[in-house]
Amino acid sequence: MPNEPGLDGDPSAGSRQRAVFLSYASEDSDAAQRICDSLRAAGIEVWFDQSELRGGDVWDDAIRKQIRSCALFVPVISMNAHARIEGYFRLEWKLAVDRSHLIAPDQAFLLPVVIDGTPQTDERIPDRFRELQWTRLPAGATTPAFVERVLRLLSPDGHGSPARGRPSAGVPPGVDPAFKQPSMNWGASSLRRAALLLLVAAVVVAVCYFAVDRLVLSKHVAETGQASTANSPAGTSGPSAIPEKSIAVLPFVDMSEKKDQEYFSDGLAEELIDKLTQIPQLHVPARTSSFSFKGKPITVGEIAHVLGVTHVLEGSVRKSGDHVRITTQLVRADSGFHVWSQTYDRDVRDIFVVQDDIAHAVAEELKITLLGSDSVASRQTTNSDAHNLYLQARFLVGRDTVADLDHAVLLYQQAVKLDPNYAAAWAGLAYCQIRRVSNGQETTGVGFSKATAAAKRAIELDPRLPEGYITLAVAKMQYQLDWSGTAEALAKAATLDANNALAQQMLGHLSVASGRMSEALSHFRRSVDGDPLNLLYRKYLARALHYARRTNDAVAVLRDAISLDEHFPGLHYELGRTLLLQGDAKAALNAFEAESDHSWRSFGLPLGYFASNRLQEARAALNELLKESAGSEFQVAETYGFFGETDKAFEWLDRTVTQHDPGIIWLRRDALLTSLEANPRYPALLKRINVPSVSQND
């Protein structure tokens, strides 16, 4: 059967062995198409109906035959599906559930995929789906691990099927056979080794139970096992789509008597993340994502599921005077199995040696090649006060608000004053200045000068630190409009760290400026994959999807991000813009009015009022925007363009270039400026800013 939706007969016997049936609500067609394309690219047969659901007996019979014959049934779960109280996809889901009851319990058939923030407790989703572990693919963005999982499930040996029956030899009970410990040699004595491993783990857990430092960790891991059972069918362990060589480093728990070592303990975890991310073979979520769960009542298993990792490293810090005890343990999230644990007693002056010890031990357990211990030494500081200031500043930058960025600048400046050779702090200061310019807090060009100077200082101190080159690239792109210089600096950062999420983010911006939207989307997705809970990265992914006119996907990404933090600056504004493009003026205005950040709200209200034909209010909102237009020249131009006032729009685009408003890199394919594209001044403006010519394929 060809790789097109076949509704004209019974599938061939050969296709039945590898066919995947993709079922979705029509509103999710873009996301479903992406999943389909990824699977077909791997040679997987996908039955994916793209008709207008015209109905009829022949069509209905064909759909039923496919559901009876497919090897895997993939329901695409979303808020769109939740909202549809009727739909043919619901009949497809019922037919698939009915068939699942006729299939042997050790044979995988249902593979639920959720593309947004729909909770697994959603009562409008069939109970049978909610009993299984969901795979989260935001906006349908598939990963190689997901494709590999589907291939396993379709393979004749059934390695990917849920572990409901007898476990494979050499694998601890309850652990998916696909996840064998890489550090073990499972040979003829595999059963003895498994028993020995379980015995050792039991001893470790028993010792941990009586150690005060382990009380918090043991409780956390106990909850992990419960979560694993809850997310699996009937108390069994379902297959996982996450990569084997992956680890999330959680913030270490401050167990000091005065509870005053939070930034010290956070620093340990951050340095571990920094070191482990240098290993190309290892997937390590960025600090923003790993630390987002801090202080929240969530289990290790749930954290691992959200971040897409197999292993979790957690620990505690107990400091007394100049002495510190650090307790760590590595847990396999899908089973709650203790892989490794260790306690370090050190003098505070040896804290960076301790960090190296922990990183080396974790790397050895995962059987990967670790870079030399000197690879990150130059990024560190021996001044603990400077390091604490650096950590506080990074936390504030992640919030991306005006007040937090201003505060972060002061903290970074204090850090480099205490240690002028602290490269990472210089790089952080440079990036903070860039974000202030991007948010309109610095409008004279001085901000770019400060950012460039700090970035060059970071590179001078540590030429192996990618963040210095990345921030330098941003200044070249946004202030100098030096596209080739930008590409060169980002290429240098990529040679130092190919997995750097910030580098991928900026490569996405460069691709947008050049009009290469397919390439831009790829970079933005990689940045989100590297730091999945960084809401700034999600916001720009959604904007790129908007520019690519994939509005359903953009809305899904934004609603998912808003569910994580409804007050993050700009999320509701971006949602409103996308809803405008979909023609829903009322919903767009509601989104603009829900924006809590003053600046982003002021950008959106004129658009929402105008689209709602509330012209007097639209003009008043524009006048308010004009009063605070410094640093927002591009948004003023967009508003005039949307109002249809062409001359005013070009006047403000000219100011955008003159005043170095970084918004100019989003000129191409801007839906708010569509009315300008036929005007001769538009190509002249593109020539003026000298962006590379766009490929016809984009």
Image: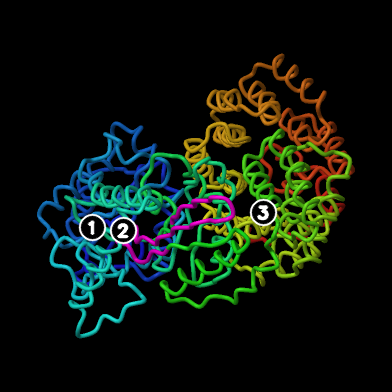
Whether residue 92 is visible here, answered yes or no, is no
Towards the viewer: 2 or 379? 379
**Residue shown at 21% from the left, 68% from the top:** 12
Dot 2, crowdedness within 10 Å: few (<14), some or many (≥20)? many
Look at mark 1 in the image and give the residue it sits on.
237
Pick the front one: 583 or 61: 583
- Contact between marks 1 and 2 (CB within 8 A): the answer is yes
> Residue 437: x and y, percent?
78, 42
For disc 2, the marked residue is: 334
Q: Could you say whether the residue bearing mark 1 is in a helix, strand or loop? A: loop
**Occupied quadrant, residue 354:** bottom right
Measure the C-alpha gap from mark 3 to mark 2: 36 Å
> Of all residues shown, which one is farthest toward the front?
321
Give the secondary structure at mark 2.
loop
Looking at the image, residue 27 sits to the left or right of residue 154; the answer is: right
Decide which of tag 1 and tag 2 comes sooner along the chain.
Answer: 1
Which residue carries the number 3 mark? 384
